Amino acid sequence: MNTQKILLSTILVLALLLSACVPAAETVPPVSTEETVQPDTEKPVPPEDTVEPYPVDETQDPGDAYPVEDSTAQPEPGSAIGGAAYITDPSASQDDLEDQAEDVNDFAVDLYRKLAVQDGNLVFSPYSIYQAFLMVYAGADAETRAEIARVLDVEPEDDDDVHNRMNALNKRLVTPPANLDEKAQPLQINIANALWVQEGFIIDQNFLDTLSANYNAGLKLVDFANPDAARQAINLWVAAQTNDKIKDLIPQGVLDELTRLVITNAVYFKGAWQNPFDPNRTASEPFFLLDGSEQSVDMMRTSYTGAGLITDRYQAAKLPYQGGNYAMAVIMPTGDFSRFDQDLDDGDLEEILNGFDGIFGQVNLGLPKFTYESTFNLGDQMKSLGIQQAFDPQAADFTRISDEIDLYISDVLHKAFIDVNEEGTEAAAATAIAVGTTSMPADSWDITFDHPFIYLIYETTTNTVVFMGRVVAP
């Protein structure tokens, strides 16, 4: 009898220990919606019992500043909730990475033309938007899936491997080069993903596994019946991941009790120029606007050995950053800017970026300082690109996310920021997709960008465009 009692007690203790080891999805505590007066500050009020994420220490990666979510660059084992652990060493060849980058860049140019019909300056991250929709693609089926595949240029033979390739491209983008100069100022690049799900809503395990294994997308449970608390929780996460540069990504009124999940992606970049501009050379100079008028701008000046292109269609320069494989490409049409802007295609992009390879000369450069922020709800643009059914409550098929209830995309929110000055560039972007239910110098180039121009921030080993935009009025 004593032996039986001891055995029974041992089994009960083991059962308790094992139950304590079962992982659970993180439940995000509600954020108080009461306004808190804080003199001389506009920083959001953090939820109770969480670590205040502001200010972010600029010496650390933005992903490290938020206590519950790590970046793709430095995932915390087990932080993503799903049956599959995050794959930290995805396998992909250089050809695979370049093919994936080409798909991203094709999408970048297609979406740029849609956004460029609006007046004014522009900045967005095609990489962030593409990746967010690739996560949505993982949960789509039938014609909804086919439409997203066509817009993202996912070929049928790549269907099973596209998420692995995106993971590998993420890793390439955030991994510093092996031969990094120890004296170089470190370049910061952060890519983070998260999945925000209504408490009690049943999600398909394969969908969860795909996102956790390939995107390190941590599952966070929220209550959309309290939409403002859910909105603030998501916005705080985005702000922390982008070094506080993207605030209030999701405005009031977007989320409601019918929202079932929100997929978020955030990208942050900060790099110092390899050839900094001398602040003493910055002076007020004219910039010629689209209507022919002039505007005085702070024109930065520098000279360096690098790559430039002057053709009968455009002038372009490559501005490398320290500490990694990144550069800015600046392109100024020599003729009609509006026509060049609307006719720009992936072939032009490839011609310019590949045209920089292997050429060196003296670049005497003038570039205006500029800071800009863009905010979009991309529903109309994505529909015009060909993603129709995903937005239609009657036709959308997201049964790979859940077959418990009909789902459709209600909003695609994107916000981006860029600051270009003498020292370098800081850029950030975030995307949220809300899913709801019906219920050698032989050459020399003198280039002054004093007319409207297009710019890109891209990774140079794959030519992946991470940020893209234009300046028509600095």
Image: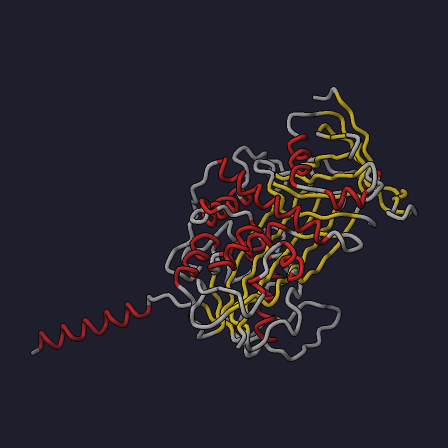
Question: Which residue of the protein is positioned furthest toward the right in this rendering?
Answer: 293
Q: Residue at x 60, y 77 (%)?
A: 32
The coloring applied to the image is secondary structure
Residue 382 in the figure: left or right of residue 337: left
Name the foreground residue: 201 vs 38: 201
Where residue 208 appears, as percent x and y from the top left, is 43, 61
Where residue 222 appears, as percent x and y from the top left, is 51, 72
Residue 121 in the figure: left or right of residue 226: right
Question: Which residue of the protein is positioned furthest toward the top in this rendering?
Answer: 442
Where residue 473 appears, as percent x and y from the top left, is 83, 50
Name the foreground residue: 369 vs 331: 331
* Observer able to see residue 442: yes
Q: Which residue is drawn at 58% across and 76% down?
A: 256
* Observer able to see residue 243: no
In the image, is residue 424 above or below residue 58?
above
Q: Residue at x 66, y 46 (%)?
A: 109
Name the foreground residue: 473 vs 142: 142
In the image, is residue 42 above or below residue 184?
below
In the image, is residue 343 above or below residue 231?
above
Residue 117 in the figure: left or right of residue 23: right
Residue 451 in the figure: left or right of residue 247: right
Name the foreground residue: 337 vs 28: 337
Quadrant location of the N terminus in the rendered image: bottom left
Where residue 224 appears, as percent x and y from the top left, is 54, 75
Number of numbered tags placed on the structure image:
0
